[in-house]
Image (cartoon, rainbow, N blue to C red):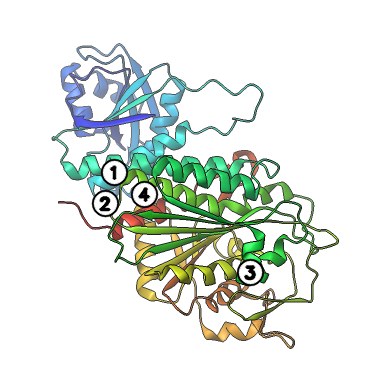
């Protein structure tokens, strides 16, 4: 979908459809008032008859409105004007795009980004309008023999009463790049395990590097063995697919600037290994590489934006399968850091590949390291499918990520990382065990990772509840690409 922004008067705008808002009680938004005046009060007459009450998530499509250049007018309910919150604005966007998909227009002009949203600015309005539009158009039927015909809607104009400034155009450009990153993350996440193998993931990373002139490297198992990545390699022992350690380097700033390293869990299929998962819902374990997918999506987005930062992606990727050679409960392995791990549950494999990747990340002398992983079912129990679990060894970093997530509407919630939980990982036979029991499972998983991140400031995002949806809407969400991208935007120098 193509997005643009410009100053525009609704009564003069040629378009397949104009989208204007109506507040609860029939109060017209400023752009709707302008249309109503030129259309000889046609809109207010319809509202007076009760066909549109302005309640949230309601729409009314009008044809042949007099004295305007557009073919149609879509009235969208905004809710109470005194309580016009971010949620109401997002609801209005989703309702608008939902209604536009059902009509035959090829282009539309949205007169919504000028609306005053509580606690938000116009750049936020613009970004969310673009993200919602791209979300409405996304499809995941590329592997069907007869994919559905794409909708007719191709172009969206974000119309403003005043001439948009450079900040508005920058917001538009950034959000478009963000949608491309989200789309990449979704497409990778939705692919089945027989297609999206570690080798395939490495190939996609190499293509991304070639397209955006990134530095790429892929370590094979022999090279990982030489580095002492026995924890990572213990996970892949039961699979016929070779493991890969993928790195991408984006150099947007001086070489003197320390990079931000993003580490993405890339388990392309997780059977649980010898600690086999139940059969029901196991197909969704193709989504266990959504951390890796989100990192690749973020790298694409920031490369398109040209952010003045140095960012490195580190992606450990393998399958977790049962086999005669697979790791067994009770096995002990030595990680790249030299710390020994007793594997009590082979289904707690994400932390086993991440710990070696986090040790490897130190060689880039990072300013910050953030790992992203579909790590624990316990996080889903704690936070559901709304918020990502956030852990950090520095409260300032946690606040930066929380603020970025709040602004991007890709929210996270900080969880405790207290030393009190560390004792649950004590082992009689090794330096630590890979599980800490049922109590606080997401916390003890983060505590495990924290033992490999003492050299730098670090945050962990547990996206087990937010990376994909189940049921009728089953599919990858692309999260947390918006959060990560906004965090990096916030860290980049402001161009004057």
Vertical position of residue 350 compared to residue 248: above or below: below
- Which mark lies nearer to you, 1 or 4? 4
> Residue 165, percent across and down?
15, 41
User: Counting residues from the N terminus, which is met first, the one under dot 4 or under dot 3?
Assistant: 3
Residue matched to label 1: 125
Q: Is residue 386 visible?
A: yes
Say what secondary structure mark 1 lies in.
Answer: helix
Residue 78 or 408: which is nearer the viewer?
408
How far apart marks 2 and 1 lie (CA) works out to: 7 Å
Residue matched to label 4: 302
How far apart marks 2 and 3 lie (CA) works out to: 51 Å
Residue 410 or 306: which is nearer the viewer?
306
Residue occupying the point 19% across, 20% down: 11
Q: Are marks 3 and 1 in contact (CB under 8 Å)?
A: no
Residue matched to label 2: 120
Q: Is residue 126 visible?
A: no
Residue matched to label 3: 226
Quarter occupied by residue 439: bottom right
> Residue 216, percent across and down?
48, 52
Residue occupying the point 54% across, 76% down: 452
How far apart marks 2 and 4 lie (CA) works out to: 23 Å
Q: Is residue 95 left or right of residue 203?
A: left
Q: Are marks 2 and 3 in contact (CB under 8 Å)?
A: no
Q: Is residue 359 left or right of residue 300?
A: right
How far apart marks 1 and 4 lie (CA) works out to: 20 Å
Q: Are marks 2 and 1 in contact (CB under 8 Å)?
A: yes
User: Counting residues from the N terminus, which is met first, the one under dot 2 or under dot 4?
Assistant: 2
Disc on res. 252: none
């Amino acid at each position: 979908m193509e997005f643009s922004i410009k100053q525009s008067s609704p009564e003069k705008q040629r378009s397949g459809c104009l989208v204007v808002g109506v507040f609860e009680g029939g109060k017209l938004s400023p752009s709707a008032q302008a249309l109503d005046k030129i259309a000889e009060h046609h809109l207010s007459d319809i509202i007076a008859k009760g066909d549109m009450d302005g309640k949230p998530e309601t729409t009314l499509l009008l044809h042949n409105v007099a004295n305007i250049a557009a073919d149609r007018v879509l009235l969208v309910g905004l809710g109470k004007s005194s309580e016009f919150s971010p949620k109401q604005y997002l609801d209005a966007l989703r309702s608008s795009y939902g209604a536009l998909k059902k009509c035959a227009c090829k282009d539309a002009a949205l007169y919504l980004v000028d609306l005053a949203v509580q606690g938000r600015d116009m750049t936020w309005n613009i970004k969310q309008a673009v993200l919602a539009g791209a979300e409405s158009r996304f499809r995941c039927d590329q592997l069907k023999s007869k994919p559905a015909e794409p909708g007719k809607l191709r172009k969206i104009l974000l119309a403003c009463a005043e001439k948009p400034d450079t900040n508005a155009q920058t917001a538009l450009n950034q959000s478009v790049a963000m949608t491309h990153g989200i789309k990449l993350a979704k497409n990778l996440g939705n692919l089945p395990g027989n297609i999206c193998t570690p080798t395939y993931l490495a190939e996609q990373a190499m293509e991304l590097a070639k397209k955006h002139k990134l530095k790429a490297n892929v370590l094979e198992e022999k090279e990982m063995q030489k580095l002492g990545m026995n924890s990572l390699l213990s996970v892949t022992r039961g699979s016929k697919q070779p493991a890969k350690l993928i790195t991408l380097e984006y150099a947007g700033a001086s070489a003197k600037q320390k990079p931000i390293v993003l580490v993405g869990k890339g388990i392309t299929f997780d059977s649980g290994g010898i600690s086999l998962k139940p059969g029901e819902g196991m197909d969704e374990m193709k989504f266990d590489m959504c951390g890796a997918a989100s990192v690749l999506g973020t790298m694409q987005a920031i490369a398109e934006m040209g952010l003045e930062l140095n960012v490195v992606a580190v992606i450990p990727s393998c399958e977790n399968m049962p086999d005669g050679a697979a790791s067994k409960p009770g096995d002990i392995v030595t990680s790249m850091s030299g710390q020994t791990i007793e594997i009590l549950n082979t289904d707690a494999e994400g932390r086993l590949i991440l710990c070696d990747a986090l040790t490897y990340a130190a060689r880039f002398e990072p300013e910050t390291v953030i790992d992203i992983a579909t790590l624990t079912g316990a996080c889903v129990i704690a936070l559901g499918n709304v918020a990502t679990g956030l852990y950090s060894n520095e409260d300032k970093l946690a606040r930066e990520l929380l603020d970025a997530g709040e602004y991007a509407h890709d929210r996270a919630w900080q969880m405790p990382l207290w030393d009190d939980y560390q004792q649950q990982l004590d082992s009689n036979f090794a330096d630590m065990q890979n599980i800490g029991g049922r109590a606080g499972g997401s916390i003890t998983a983060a505590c495990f990772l924290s033992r490999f991140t003492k050299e730098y400031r670090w945050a962990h995002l547990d996206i087990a509840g937010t990376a994909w949806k189940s049921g009728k809407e089953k599919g990858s969400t692309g999260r947390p690409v918006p959060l990560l991208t906004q965090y990096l935007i916030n860290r980049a120098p402001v161009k004057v």
